[in-house]
């Protein structure tokens, strides 16, 4: 079966750096997305990786290793507004989007 | 720019009543359209997706149905709601099958 694993919950301190990991086992690979979802709101797109390596967007970076079936989202200079759930999703060989259950990130002052 | 509208934002319905949720997209043509449901504290479950007018693919057998009467309109319906239909319903669009999804604001449905 197809599976995406993310930690259920993480806690970090304001101003610090946090890395949220995502491992996947899917039938093929056509890209990986990261989304941010604040409580009670819809997810919003953060990043897309299809080739190995690091994609940087301001305070957020996303890394992909296709050979390891692994990605991480790196958040720097954490702010209280970064408290949210972070969803990892993989596009498989049939172009179906497989979603992880999400990682709830709690930021403490 | 593209925008997606979804309504209503919240809905409380009794068991056995019908349902109609509507979603429209502006600023793009021939989008892929999706209906997702998210139970409290859970991941996203794909219910339906559409790649064109009248083309609907169902991912989960249930008492829900979807229709796409126009290129940028996607409707989720039920003839008789169940308690288990409660959840957060999200409409989304994308340009292609491996493009980012853009979500509407969602509808929080409570079936009582």
Image (cartoon, rainbow, N blue to C red):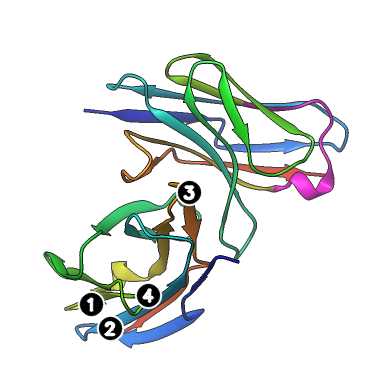
Q: Which residue was labeled with disc 4?
A: A69
Q: Which residue was labeled with disc 2?
A: A18
Q: Which of marks 2 and 3 is in front?
A: 3
Quarter residue B41 falls in: bottom right
Instruction: Say which residue appears at 75% left-offset and 45% top-offset.
Output: B85
Instruction: Say which residue appears at 46% left-offset and 47% top-offset.
Output: A94
Choose the circle earlier in sequence order: 4 or 3. 4
B80 in the magenta segment: yes
Q: Which residue was labeled with disc 1?
A: A78
Instruction: Say which residue appears at 33% left-offset and 58% top-offset.
Output: A33
In the image, taking residue B85 as reference, residue B23 lies left or right, namely left
Instruction: Report the Cα–Cα distance between label 1 and label 4.
Output: 26 Å
Please tell me how crowded label 2 is: few (under 14), some (14-19), or many (20+) other residues with Cα within 10 Å: some
Choose the circle earlier in sequence order: 1 or 2. 2
Give the percent coordinates (x, y) of residue B51. Answer: 46, 27
Q: Is residue B30 above or below residue A76?
A: above
Residue nearest the observer in this picture, B101 or B84:
B101
The magenta-colored residue range is: B76-86
Discs 1 and 4 carry the same chain letter: yes
Instruction: Report the Cα–Cα distance between label 2 and label 4.
Output: 20 Å
In the image, taking residue B84 as reference, residue A99 lies left or right, namely left
Residue nearest the observer in this picture, A37 or A30:
A30
Discs 1 and 3 carry the same chain letter: yes
Choose the circle earlier in sequence order: 1 or 4. 4
Q: Which residue was labeled with disc 3?
A: A96
Tag 4 subunit: A
């Amino acid at each position: 079966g197809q599976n995406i694993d993310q930690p259920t919950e993480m806690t970090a301190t304001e101003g610090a750096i946090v890395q949220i990991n995502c491992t996947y086992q899917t039938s093929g690979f056509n890209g990986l997305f990261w989304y941010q979802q604040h409580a009670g709101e819809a997810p919003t797109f953060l990043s897309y990786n299809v080739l190995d390596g690091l994609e940087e967007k301001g305070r957020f970076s996303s890394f992909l290793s296709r050979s390891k079936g692994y990605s991480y989202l790196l958040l720097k200079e954490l702010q209280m507004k970064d408290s949210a759930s972070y969803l990892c999703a993989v596009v498989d060989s049939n172009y179906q989007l497989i979603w992880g259950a999400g990682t709830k990130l709690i930021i403490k002052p | 720019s593209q925008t997606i509208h979804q309504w209503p934002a919240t809905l409380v319905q009794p068991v056995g009543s019908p349902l109609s949720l509507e979603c429209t997209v502006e600023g793009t043509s021939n989008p892929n359209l999706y209906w997702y449901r998210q139970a409290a504290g859970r991941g996203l479950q794909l219910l339906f997706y559409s790649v064109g007018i009248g083309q609907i693919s169902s991912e989960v057998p249930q008492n829900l149905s979807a229709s796409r009467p126009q290129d940028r309109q996607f409707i989720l319906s039920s003839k008789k709601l169940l308690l288990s239909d409660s959840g957060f319903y999200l409409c989304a669009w994308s340009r292609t099958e491996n493009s980012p999804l853009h979500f509407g604001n969602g509808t929080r449905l409570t079936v009582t």
